[in-house]
Image (tube, rainbow, N blue to C red):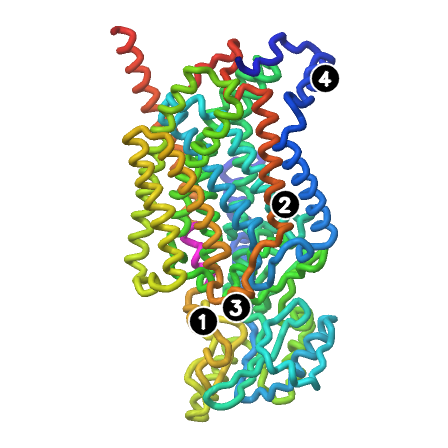
Amino acid sequence: MGIDRRTFLKGLGAGMAVTLPGSSLLARNLEAEDIAARKEFSGVLVDTTRCVGCRSCEMACAEAHGMPIPDIGDTSALDTVRPTSVTQWTVVNRYKTDKGDVFAKKQCMHCNQPGCVAACLVKAMAKQPDGAVTWDTNCMGCRYCMISCPFDIPKFEYDSAFPKIQKCSLCWERLQKGQKPACVEACPAEALTFGKRRDLIEEANRRIYGEAGKYVSHIYGEREVGGTGYLYLAAVPFEQIGFRTDLGTTAYPEYSKGFLYSVPIVLLLWPAFLIGINTITKRKNELQSREGGKR
Amino acid sequence: MNTLTATEEIKGLKDFVTFLSRELKPKGKLLTPFNVISASLILLGAILVLYRLVKGMGAVTNLSQEFPWGIWIGFDVMVGVAFAGGAYVLTFVVYILHSDKYHSLIRATVLNGLLAYVFYAGAIFLDLGRWWNITNPLWGNKFGANSVLFLISWHFLLYMIAEFVEFSPAIAEWLGMRKLRKFLGSLTLGAVVVGIALSTLHQAGLGALFMMAKGKVHPLWYTEFIPVLFFVSSIFAGLSMVIFEGTISHRVFSDKISHEEHAAYDEMLVGLSQGCAVAMFVYFFAQLLILIHGWHWALLNTAMGWWYLVENVGLVAIPCLLFFQGARYRNLLVIRTAAILAMIGIIINRLNISIIAFKWWIPFSERYFPSWMEIVITLAIILTEVWVFRWVVNRMPVFGKPPAWAEETHS
């Protein structure tokens, strides 16, 4: 007799019933895993009350990434406030504050939602699942990331015919191998702590509450520009140690979202609207010319 | 009276080659002061471009880590594209609103727009540090579709195609290709509709680029409405450019324009002036509302505040009034003065947002100022565009009437 359509469909249905949930469950699980992994960004907690300004982190960074090794014995470098540069992904600066000299390490903040990544039109800037913000060579060199970074971190090699964007990568290659960032490993004063962002915030709060009066009650980077991977503790208000405190808590990509949302609307509605007007005015002109003919 | 060429239809490749080789030769005197000066500047510019490609951007520009964008973006692209806005505004008036009065302006304006995009938006190429990757946003596996710049790069490309389609009937008429002319003419309305939609978005998009520069652009200029302001200002920037360019073209190419057209042209200027006045009023009013809602009164009495007033009163409100007056009393001199003031206002506005009011706290000595080489390359780009414009106008029916066989019954 063979199989009729009904049994065929039944069989098919049963087969699908067996395979579908399994595969979709698997897919859902993977997705969940993915999201969990993504949300749990890694970062670094910088306790500026512990930093002694030895610049070992600068040296370790230069060694890890093949950049010119700074002479950390020469303390005159601390006399000026230096920005990061194409050959220095991290710098330690000295600030005169209410509570004496304070040292603060600067580098890419590894924002949770980075402006530079949203700016990049070829995804050369990327937020890696573990939290590192990295740069890749498919970059066009448009420097829109530099415009969009609230911390002015990406640096461009203007003096090269084959320029690159240079910035701290949170030692992404090392993270892949299960190692810590080079600067964290090199710090002799335990001013730098590497870990999951959530744990770092807990640890930071523990220190703030644990030693009353030692710290200002603020973790820089917990909420700034939507949260950053690098988190800072300090004994003095953050504007005294070279941090911008006027950046707000909105993630930078949010600022251009309004415009981007309007794009599909304009592209859909505008042509329909234009063709509508075109038809109306054409009809009007026809009527007018017909009347003109009568005259 | 006009550039009627290829009167006899071209049959075969041989005719075509002889026609092209005849057309490629220069027409008119070669050794004029303008030609000599512009040619030497273009040559110098070309050498500097090579130098920039070999030595890197630092060898030619004064750009720095603090000022990543200079005049190649702030002037060439931002201002060039705003001035090219005349094309989408006029195609809207002529093809969508069917205001036939302005039809004779269309070709020169669209040609100007097309060349502006090719040359000024093309200036992006020079500004790209890693220019060999310029095609990455178009094909590849990594589309940064969340980027405003991604949108702009695609729109520039698509809009150039739309503008080319809008202008292409003139090329077909020049080549005497009747069937092609008919086909290309049928594409015009579609190209116009697409072109206006694209223009709306990328004119605004150029402003949206600075949305993420929050905290870097002076609060008097930074507002969430920058995209809207850029769009509205592109309307009068484009129309002012049409007035300015037309004034020059009508002198330089006066032999191509008939007497009736000269008379009708004055009539058009009055109309354009009214358009400018209304757009500028809307723009000024929007600026005023933004200022009031932003609570930035205190900032007005600072150096930057005075500069803001120079821009928005001196170079927006005043030309706006002049346009109203010029249109009312049909005074062409006033209209032309207003157009020039409005254009200076646009230049100042775009430079303010991208360079002058950008990181306004940095002391003067450390600020970006273009190097002479950046300026020469910019001049070379503008002059090359003028050369190409002249070449086309001298050959194709741009100012003059199209050949009799192509007398169009446009849609």
| Chain of the residue under the numbered disc 2 shown in the image | B
How many C-alpha atoms fall within 10 Å of the one at disc 4: few (<14), some, or many (≥20)?
Answer: few
- Range of magenta residues: A252-259
Inter-mark Cα distance, 1 to 3: 11 Å
How many C-alpha atoms fall within 10 Å of the one at disc 1: few (<14), some, or many (≥20)?
Answer: many
Q: Say whether mark 3 and mark 4 are on the same chain.
A: no
Which quadrant would the N terminus of chain A be assigned to in this image? top right
Amino acid carrying label 1: it is Glu
SS class, disc 2? helix
Inter-mark Cα distance, 2 to 1: 41 Å
Label 2: which residue?
B377
Q: Which mark is residue B17?
A: 4
| Chain of the residue under the numbered disc 3 shown in the image | A
Q: Which mark is residue A244?
A: none
Residue A254: within the magenta? Answer: yes
Amino acid carrying label 4: it is Val
SS class, disc 4? helix
How many C-alpha atoms fall within 10 Å of the one at disc 3: few (<14), some, or many (≥20)?
Answer: some
Amino acid carrying label 2: it is Ile
Inter-mark Cα distance, 3 to 2: 32 Å
Q: Which mark is residue A151?
A: 3
Residue B18: within the magenta? Answer: no
Q: Which mark is residue A224?
A: 1
| Front label number (2 vs 1) | 2
Judging depth in this view, the residue of B364 and A249 nearest the camera is: B364
Relative to A292, is B218 on the left or the right? right
Whichever of callouts 1 and 3 sits on the residue coming sooner in the sequence is: 3
Image coordinates for residue A201, horizontal then vertical, percent: 48, 80
Inter-mark Cα distance, 4 to 3: 59 Å
